[in-house]
Amino acid sequence: MATTLLQLTNKVLTRLREPTVSSSSSTTYSKMIAEFVRQATREVEQAHDWIQLRTTIQVPIVASTVEYVLTGAGDDFRVLGVYEDQTDYRMHRAPSYQQMNEWLLQNDRASGPPLYWDINGTSGGDPVVNFYPVPDDTYSANFNMVIVSQLDADTDYTPVPELPIVLRAQFLAIEERGDDQGVSLEVLDAQFQNALSSAVAIDAGNYPNESVWFEE
């Protein structure tokens, strides 16, 4: 179930025996707790390729143009795979940033179906991607990605399990203010690690083949 920034903030405040708020910016303390919630959310979402965070960004490719913006990807993302949609082949990431630049800066650049991609800078907060060879026709690249949530407003939400986030934010809050006369930091950290491990295991069970290793 998706949980908003405000809901998460109030869950942490309740665990700290503090009054809940109607806005995460209602008090100086709730503002700080909201920051801990944002940090905890990022840590939890970065810990695993959550199925709830997976999305596909389609990039229409036109002839002779090698640079495109992955609109909506933001600054915290992971690319799981890139696939050309019209002729159904998988694109490969360039061997290195330097190699992609060498390909694109040479005078006699190859032209044809784009086989390689790489990230090259940002535009408006979103990553810029380059393709090579230089497209000789129209294509469509599907970027299968994990995109971390941006909890800016109270109504912004994260779709990942809430318990690890709440426990981690509670840990950060207690660590900041000192002895809480309640649960110890060691116990709270263990509860967080257990909750995160359980949530990851449940989520990973939805695509078990990704965890299978093959000997070549």
Image (spheres, grey):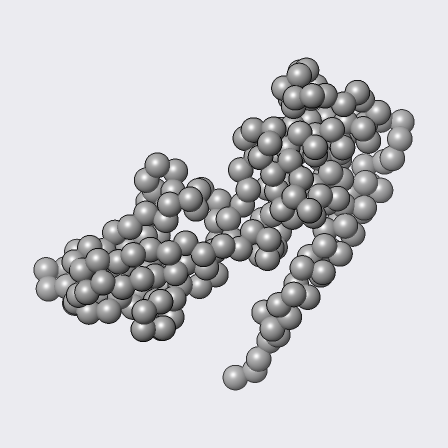
User: Is 108 or 73 nearer to us in this picture?
Assistant: 73
Position of residue 103 measured from the top left corner of the image (x, y, whole percent) = 21, 61
Q: Does residue 213 appear left or right of residue 95 in this picture?
A: right
Give x and y (percent) for residue 85. 35, 67
Residue reaching furthest bottom?
216
Q: Residue at x 38, y 70 (%)?
A: 90
The residue drawn where x is 37% and y is 49% is: 70
Q: Is residue 14 left or right of residue 164?
A: right
| x and y, in percent, of residue 59 in the image | 33, 55
Give the answer, above or below, for where 127 lies relative to 111: above
User: Is 24 rendered above or below residue 42?
Assistant: above
Residue 158 quadrant: top right
Identify which residue is drawn at 69% across, 21% down. Answer: 22
Q: Residue furthest left?
A: 107
Q: Position of residue 116 (x, y in %)?
A: 31, 65
Q: Looking at this rendering, what residue extends furthest in the top direction?
A: 27
Residue at image coords 50%, 48%:
147
Q: Nearer the viewer, residue 142 or 104?
A: 142
Quadrant of residue 202 in the image? bottom right
* Left or right placement of residue 157 versus residue 179 in this view: left
Residue 176 seen in the current view: yes
Establish if 28 lies above or below 95: above
Residue 99 in view:
no
Q: How many labels does the image show?
A: 0
Outermost residue, right side: 181
Left or right for 140, reference 108: right
